Image (cartoon, grey):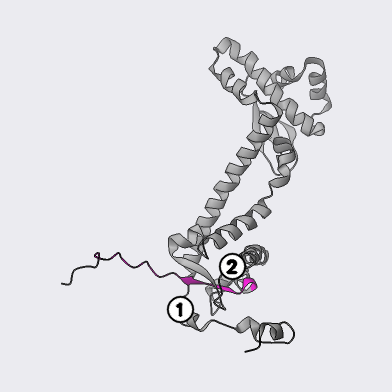
Amino acid sequence: MPSLRERRRIVTDEPYRIEPSLLGRPLASFRRRVTGFVVDLLLFGVLVVVLFVGLTALSFHRRDSRLFADLRAARATPELERAARTADVGGRFLAIMIERDPGLLDDETEAVLREGGPAALWTYLNPDDDDLTLTVVGGGSKFVSTPEGRRLQLGTDALMGGLANIYNVGFLFVAWFTAVTRLGHGRTPGKLLVRTRVVRLDGRPLSWWDCFGRAGGYSASAATALVGFLEAAWHPNRQAIHDRIAGTVVVRDPAPAPPAGDEPAAS
């Protein structure tokens, strides 16, 4: 077998070097792989939502440390006073978003803000305290008027301010799958649940670079209209595109041996 130095200078069979102990080991079925991946995606979705809410709350707290405390206090006040206190808190919320996205207002709403201030703008947009609907969108923020009322579409830049720079779903996806694969030694939470494991074909332990390459390779599998994922159903070693990129396979993990003394009694 060529040495490592030689393998970096001449054409070798490097892509096909397989650890002998892996030969004959049961591969994970396509169904198990799909189940494990769906579980991992659900956990990733929870992480994304928690991070989104956390960064949004942190960005507003850093700009106005009393905003959330005053909102809770406004909800607890008698109904006659609640509208005024809610308008004050809502106006401060809008003021922060307008500061981050100066183009958010049209001429009409900008005139209301200029003449009456943030609280007056909130009352103008939400006169009955339920006319303004808040939605989160992937693009920029803007006001949309509908027959049912006004809708404020909130973009990440206006919600998170400068913290939006660290909220990138693609980066988080790669970071999540890299970390859970490496820290789990090939067992992500989903793979642990269905008892499967990612291993290198050459038998060496997974490195951070291996896990990063495999996680980044998901984009290649997805870019083929998901055929790159489906390929694991018919490939001889059940390798998807991201497996071939990283030089890995997904195998069945043997069930743990029962503790001593738990063996079933002979009949």
Whether residue 127 can be seen here: no
Q: Is residue 205 left or right of residue 104?
A: left
Residue 118 coordinates in the image, percent (x, y):
74, 20
Residue 262 coordinates in the image, percent (x, y):
25, 64
Residue 232 coordinates in the image, percent (x, y):
55, 72
* Amino acid type at image mark 1: Arg
Q: Which residue is mark 1?
A: 25
Secondary structure, mark 1, is loop
Q: Which residue corresponds to the image point at 64% horizontal and 30% vertical from the top-left?
A: 133
Write down the quadrant of residue 127 in the picture. top right
Instruction: Please identify the quadrant where the C terminus is shown.
Output: bottom left
Nearer to us: label 2 or label 1: 1
Q: Which residue is mark 2?
A: 229
Q: Is residue 98 left or right of residue 61?
A: right
Write down the quadrant of residue 175 in the picture. bottom right
Does the segment drawn in magenta span residue 253?
Answer: yes
